[in-house]
Amino acid sequence: MPEGDATCRAASALRTALVGRTVSRFESSRLIGPSIRSGSAVERIDTHGKDIEIVFDDGVVLYTHMRMTGAWHLYRPGQKWRKRRHHASVIIETDDWIAVAFKASEVETYRQ
């Protein structure tokens, strides 16, 4: 994912899909730190360079760094993914959306 505009566009799309919504399922094959609980709500999404931080209402922050090959995708439940599941670093499901980070180079959580 290139810097700047692409990261801002991804964050904007994630904000529209996730902010104010409750997580029904969270999965990460590479997570360092506390897990995201089902029932947590997304409060806000911030960007810093190629970093995207998703802040949850329980004080947990999900940090992802995408480098040049990583990308966030949004899908509706039941929609076919454009990439294979084994490339997914993070999966966040709500009732209406599935947000997937593919090939994120860093995936960490911490408490604010």
Image: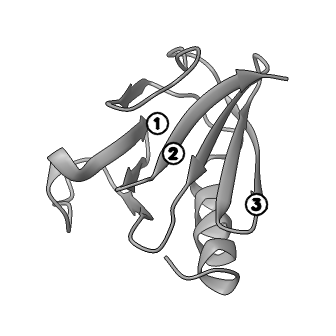
Return the residue at label 3: 47
Asked whether 11 or 89 is in front, the reply is: 89
Return the residue at label 2: 106
Amino acid under disc 3: Thr
Asked whether 110 or 36 is in front, the reply is: 110
Amino acid under disc 1: Thr
Q: Residue at point 51% right, 61% down?
A: 66
Q: CA distance from mark 2 to mark 3?
A: 14 Å
Give the mark nearer the N terminus: 2 vs 3. 3
For label 3, the crowd category at 10 Å Cα-Cα, with few meaning under 14, some 14 to 19 and many 20 or more, is some
Return the residue at label 1: 94
Asked whether 23 or 27 is in front, the reply is: 27
Residue 8 picture location, percent across and down = 69, 74
For label 2, the crowd category at 10 Å Cα-Cα, with few meaning under 14, some 14 to 19 and many 20 or more, is some
Give the mark nearer the N terminus: 1 vs 3. 3
Amino acid under disc 2: Glu
In the image, residue 72 sits, relative to residue 107, either above or below, namely below
In the image, residue 45 sits, relative to residue 26, either above or below, namely below
